[in-house]
Amino acid sequence: MTSANPKPLLDEFRWPLRIYWEDTDAGGVVFYANYLKFFERARTEWLRTLGFSQQAMRLEEQAMFVVTDTQVRHRQPARLDDLVEVTVRLAERGRASLVLEQQAWRDGTLLAEGRIRIGCVDATSLRPRRMPPALLSALGLQP
């Protein structure tokens, strides 16, 4: 659900995840494209901690996010059973798009880092639109 009383914006959000068989290739190493999935999950949980559900935004506000640009640099492999922490940091904010910097860490070792641009679109037409007013406020922007 969208939030009437959004929570304060965090400098950096951290989300833990465990690496399972389904995340790895035949050698037990995380398949490179799965870091995008990990980043997506962390962004969803980041929004949730701010008080916003993507499903509720789509149903109640007819607004949803689409990824418009990604840059990912892979530094070290994650492996089966690793406990990884994925971070989200808001780098740029606008009324219709956000740029987020994300990292995946294991025990202080940087595994992957990315810069992801997401845009808000109308859920029916998929045309760009402003984010819902409550979310803009939560991000420190005037609605």
Image: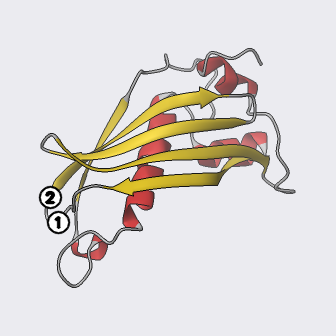
Is residue 52 left or right of 64 when viewed as pictured?
Answer: left
Q: In the rendered image, which quarter contains the C terminus?
A: top right
The percent coordinates of residue 48 (x first, y second) are: 49, 36
Quarter of the view holding residue 61:
top right
Residue under pointer 2:
82
Tell me whether circle 1 and circle 2 mark residues in contact (CB < 8 Å).
Answer: yes
Quarter of the view holding residue 117:
top right
- Distance (Cα) linking label 1 and label 2: 6 Å
Which mark is on residue 45?
none
Is residue 139 placed above or below 101 in the rendered structure? above
Residue under pointer 1:
79
Is residue 22 placed above or below 134 in the rendered structure? below
Q: From this viewpoint, is residue 1 visible? A: no
Is residue 107 left or right of 116 when viewed as pictured?
Answer: left
The percent coordinates of residue 128 (x first, y second) are: 82, 45
The percent coordinates of residue 51 (x first, y second) are: 53, 29
Residue type at tag 2: Asp
Is residue 84 placed above or below 102 in the rendered structure? below
User: Residue at 82% across / 40% down in the picture?
Assistant: 129
Q: Secondary structure at mark 1?
A: loop
